[in-house]
Structures are given as structure tokens and as C-alpha cells.
Image: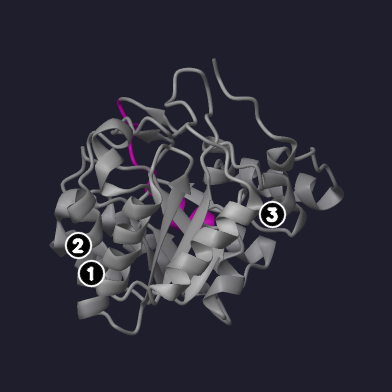
Amino acid sequence: MRPRLPDYLKRGIIDTEKTKEVRKILQSKGLNTVCDAARCPNKGECYAKHTATFLVLGDICTRNCRFCSVKSGLPTLVDPDEPSKIKDAVKELGLKYVVITMVTRDDLSDGGASHIAKIVNEIKLLDDAPKVEVLISDLAGNFGALDVIMQTQIDVLNHNIETVKELYSSVRPKALYQRSLDVLDYTKKNYPSVKTKTGIMLGLGETIEQLKRLFSDLKAIDCDILTAGQYIQPTKNHIQVDKYLTEEEFLELENIARAQGLKYLAFGPLVRSSYKAKELFFL
């Protein structure tokens, strides 16, 4: 039996002129957002602030992580006009901080890195160029591909480690815990001016001791920013929630992470990878 969703995790529908305008801009350009694809509970709040998180390289992922509602299967062809479409949308939305996310594209030789680089380069051509955060896949461990992205003018490299090492086989069967750490570690060592960021979900069955080891691993590679939010089961076909954490439990875990040396943290039931990304960057 699926645990009942607590009231504090429910969000009402926000429908204002601003949210309608954001949807109109995105739809007119045929752009995807992770807000829709991942069923983010904060979509209404973000749209109301005239912002959205772009999802690029299509909306079909080549992996099948058991927590994620993004579609998986045979991906679509890459849209060569997507970089210019996103630049135009950023301009129309008036964004000063842009978050670009991607589906995993194991079918592409560089995992889609060159396409990401083109998008960043287009955005940076804008007057008063905004800050850019990219949330990438592990690129199948291809650090040459990672270099292609890092040699643009990105400001934050985000790669989500998602959960503790012990749960990878059940939660992320096509991913590797150490490979995800290596993406962040390689970035920090070779591009120290770029902030590194990662995110985790809680409520999958992880223990406090396992989380302490994860926090220690992130501290060891000098990861700058960590977000942590409650896992919410998208459909009955996805991995089931083990536990809904209270706000007090989130605060307790945030204090543990801070005690282990992690500095820039956002912990809370509805926190997501790109939630209040701009505010975290300027802390």
C-alpha cells in the first residue's frame, strides 16, 4: 500500500497572468521544461516568478531511474535550433539566472555535451549575460565531453548524486555512485572557479549513517552546494516511498551536513535541484 501524501507536501494550482505568459513563451518555441517532465511540485511558484528550468536534448531519457517521471526509451533527434530558441526565451522571460537541465543521452557519442555548450554560448551572447547553471548527466564518465561543457562560461556545474551509495542498484540501476562523485571531483579540480552542486532525495530507505558517509564524500571533493528534498512517487510504477520526513527531520539532517563541513545547503520537503538556484548561488 502506497503511503499517503502528507498535507505539507501538497501544493495548490497557481494560475496567474505571469504563469500563463511563461507557458505561452515556452509553447511558442516548442521548449521542454523539467518543471513539467519531472512533475515538479514547485512549478506554479516558479512560473509565477516568471522563471522556468529548461530541459534540453528532447524529453526522452535513455536510462530508467526508478524514481524519475521523465519518459525513457528511444530518444528523438536533437533540435539544432534549440540553442537559439532558448536564448530567445531567456530574453523574453528576462532571466538573470538560467538553469539548463538535460535528459541522459547515452546514444550520443558525447552524451550531448556539444549541444549543451552551444546553448550556453548562445545565452552568454545576450546583453548583460545571465548566470548559467547546467544540470548534467554523468556523460557516461566521458571527461573529454565534460571539458566541452566546462570550457564555456558556465557559472555552476550541477550533477545530482540522487541517493546514498547503498541504494544505487535499486534506485539508479544504470548509474554508478563513484562515477557521479568523479564528475563533481573532476570539475572542481580542473575548473575551480566554477561552483559545483549536487542534489539528493530523501525517503528512499537511506539511513543516517549512510547519509553521513555521503556528506563526507561530498566534503572530500569540495562540493559547493547541496540540495535535499523529499522523494515523491510519481506513479505506482515508480519506486515506492519508504518514509515521508518531517521538516524537523530535514533540519536535523541539514545540521549534520553542516557539521561535516558542507556550507551552502538547501534542505526541505519540497526542495528540488533547481529550486531557488539563483538565491543559493549568491549566498
Q: Is residue 101 left or right of residue 146?
A: right
Where's the N terminus, which quadrant? top right
Q: How far apart are marks 2 and 3 (CA)?
A: 31 Å
Circle 1 residue: 185
Residue ranking furthest to the front: 209
Q: In which quarter of the image is residue 199?
A: bottom left
Q: What residue type is labelled 3?
A: Cys
Circle 3 residue: 46
Residue 90 locus on image (x, y percent):
59, 62
Residue 210 locus on image (x, y percent):
32, 51
Residue drawn at x 25%, y 73% is 220
In the image, the segment drawn in magenta is 74-88
Circle 2 residue: 182
Q: How far apart are marks 3 and 1 (CA)?
A: 30 Å
User: Mark 3 or mark 2, which is nearer the start of the sequence?
Assistant: 3
Q: Which of marks 2 and 3 is in front?
A: 2
Q: Which amino acid does label 1 sit on?
A: Asp
User: Mark 1 or mark 3, which is nearer the start of the sequence?
Assistant: 3
